[in-house]
Amino acid sequence: MICGADEAGRGPCVGPLVVAGVLVENDMEIVRIGACDSKQLTPRKREHLAQQIQQTVHRSELIVLPASDIDDLRKTMTLNELEVYMFSKIIEKLKPEICYVDAADVNEERFGRDILSRLSFKPQMISKHKADEQYPIVGAASILAKVTRDEHVRKIAQELEPQLDLPLGSGYPADPVTRQFLEAWVSKFGSLPPHVRQSWDTCQKLMRNHKTKKLDEF
């Protein structure tokens, strides 16, 4: 049995980090349905493929780590270590003989070794940068992770947007829509909204600027 594992939501300052893993006997059917890197697909195509993947694979696993849990874990580990921890949890459940993972570490071999060190068994580990582009099995995992994260972000938007009458955006720090939303929220409420990674530099800078502004007004 082979598995692929990938994540969605490493960089955003809003919403969860999602890691997905899929287990198959071989990847022929995954290839046939057109599973590939989720970033190359439209949202509609991703959602359609996610349903097909769930019906095709022998088994799949997901871990959804909320923003508050990310903040707590970041107190004791780096983001790469956090991903190693989550990937190992997924792979431990799937118990593949061969495992393909999308390496988050700049050193792709080290990322694979770190995952292996946390497992109770020792599968063959293929850890590569952009594995979701090279291996359909990892592409399938990336689709499940991305679709799941998008669902969570939609729910967060439905919860938060009515309080400002502004769109939340993608949740990424570089998204001007997200930045405008966070700035407006902090200006109105004096704190960051729920579901935001307070340990992220973007969020901490927003709060520092807000506190400086309040002091200046005083």
Image (tube, rainbow, N blue to C red):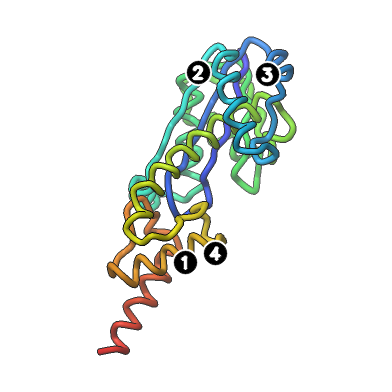
In the displayed structure image, the side of residue 180 where residue 133 appears, left or right: right
Please tell me the numbered disc located at residue 100: none
Disc 2 to disc 4, C-alpha distance: 39 Å
Looking at the rendered image, the disc whose residue lies closer to the viewer, 3 or 1, is 1
The amino acid type of the residue labelled 1 equals Gln
Residue at (55, 11) in percent of width and height = 58
Whole-percent x and y of residue 50?
A: 57, 25
Whole-percent x and y of residue 123?
A: 59, 20
Picture layout, residue 182 above or below residue 106: below
Q: Secondary structure at mark 2?
A: helix
The residue identified by callout 3 is 30
Disc 2 to disc 1, C-alpha distance: 41 Å
Q: Residues within 10 Å of mark 3 (few under 14, many from 20)?
A: many
Please tell me the numbered disc located at residue 176: 4
Picture layout, residue 75 above or below residue 190: above
Question: Decide: marks 1, 4 in contact (CB < 8 A)?
Answer: yes
Residue at (52, 47) in percent of width and height = 10
The amino acid type of the residue labelled 3 equals Ile
Between 108 and 83, the residue placed more toward the observer is: 83
The residue identified by callout 2 is 94
Residue at (68, 35) in percent of width and height = 37
Whole-percent x and y of residue 104?
A: 59, 43
Whole-percent x and y of residue 32?
A: 73, 17
Q: Earlier in the sequence, mark 2 or mark 3?
A: 3
The residue identified by callout 1 is 180
Quarter residue 1 falls in: top right
Disc 2 to disc 3, C-alpha distance: 17 Å
Q: Residues within 10 Å of mark 4 (few under 14, many from 20)?
A: some
